[in-house]
Image (cartoon, coloured by chain):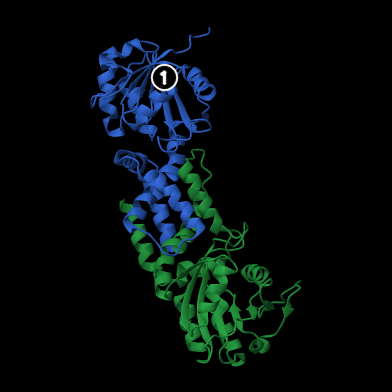
Chain colours: A green, B blue
Amino acid sequence: MSRPMPRSVLIIGFGAFGRLMAAHLAPHLAVAVCDPAADPGNTDLQVVQVAGAAAFDIVVLAVPVPAFAGCLRQIAPHLRPGQIVIDTCSIKQEPARLMQQLLPPHVQLLGCHPLFGPQSARPGLAGQRVVLCPLRGTGWRRIAAFLRHRLGLQIVLSSPEEHDRHAALTQGLTHLLAHAMRELAPHPKIRTRSFDLIMEGLDMVGQDAPEVFHAVTRGNPHMPALRQRLAQLLSQG
Amino acid sequence: MSRPMPRSVLIIGFGAFGRLMAAHLAPHLAVAVCDPAADPGNTDLQVVQVAGAAAFDIVVLAVPVPAFAGCLRQIAPHLRPGQIVIDTCSIKQEPARLMQQLLPPHVQLLGCHPLFGPQSARPGLAGQRVVLCPLRGTGWRRIAAFLRHRLGLQIVLSSPEEHDRHAALTQGLTHLLAHAMRELAPHPKIRTRSFDLIMEGLDMVGQDAPEVFHAVTRGNPHMPALRQRLAQLLSQG
């Protein structure tokens, strides 16, 4: 049985990432937005209330991690069977657990972590990477095909556990180092090409919201062991 | 009084950096080489013994840091008044102290740290940076002019103390992190652009000789405090 292609999407949370997504989805799908925390402000898109969520094929959650559980409780009563709910958190284990626990069993679930943001996606989305963690239902296959073929994204399939384990090394460590370097305030007179590259990498995450820093360094369950091992390596190395 | 421009240089230590330097100096100066540790191998350059050092306007030391003091003791009796002796160690405080202590007071001394190596200089020397720490005499001014105008290098003037303080943050930290990452062996499935840049930077120093790692992480007197502060920031951040 071939299911119909999703035609409409509700983006809940209209911050920097919600806006980026809306801009890239609007040429392909009917896009509406909803911001439980604030007025979405000036937009040409349809603005709806959470209570209107059932009208959309896909519901994308683009709220900060600390607001995630509250948002799930708010939308849960308004979802209809077969809808696909997608989260976009930078960590995947805890959001997956919360969606499975707090959303009704009749909705499909997909974990999603775009490995880009407004800054790194400035040249365009083509070739950027996005992690998908299928959690419930098969609707994610059409989403993956859409992201690959229409938006040109590279799909990385993963379990939430595998995502968080690997992301601890990449994201978690990068944010920790960026934070440490900001504290050390290095504007060294002696610069090498390798140091310049490292600082360029660290500067890319330096402008991320504090919630992102908190999520990837504290919300990732693989970070405590990694922090300890790293501190050990740096003091004995 | 205008001193004559130096015309000849003896490079002591014919490892990767000695060879790089010889190749770039040979079009401009009479270059001879001397390797106290090993046969210089296949070279078109003049090969001399340490005892012949007095014949050259400039003597450049390109030996590993652990061999540095021994090399100074070996050449000290063969130097003549007015010669310029230049070291190229990755750290500057300890080599400066050793040169001032072990070489006769009648030679001029210049500390030099090229912020590039065979790998990063592959596209050419133009625009690369070199740190100069004038230690004794004024002959370094002609050397600086030569490096700037003939080789296209950018000169960074510094005291040995300032060099090592800044280099702890750039070089020392970079090598420590490269070492730590090699131990963690990250080939993560989840990669971000910022992580890729950081790894590119770390890979540039990953191939450096163990002596370089040891010098910049142990031989730099500013590293212990920096290591401690960093470990603190990474565990509490």
Crowding at dot 1, Cα within 10 Å, few <14 / some 14-19 / many 20+, comes out as some
Q: Position of residue A33 (x, y in %)?
A: 68, 78
Q: Position of residue B216 (x, y in %)?
A: 36, 40
> Disc 1: which chain?
B
As helix, strand or loop, the secondary structure at mark 1 comes to loop
Q: Position of residue B167 (x, y in %)?
A: 44, 40
**Pointer 1 residue:** B26
Q: Position of residue B46 (x, y in %)?
A: 32, 16
Question: Residue placed at 41% from the left, 44% from the top?
Answer: B204
Location of residue A86 with respect to A122 vertically, above or below = below
B213 on left or right of B151: left
Q: Residue furthest left?
A: B38
Whether residue A182 is visible to the viewer of this picture, yes or no, is: no
Question: Residue placed at 34% from the left, 57% from the top?
Answer: B185
Q: Residue furthest top?
A: B1
Location of residue A67 with respect to A24 vertically, above or below = below
Number of labelled discs? 1
Question: Residue placed at 50% from the left, 25% from the top?
Answer: B151
Q: Amino acid at mark 1?
A: Ala
A25 on left or right of A85: right
**Residue B115, quarter of picture:** top left
Question: Residue placed at 44% from the left, 76% from the top?
Answer: A93
Whether residue A92 is visible to the viewer of this picture, yes or no, is: yes
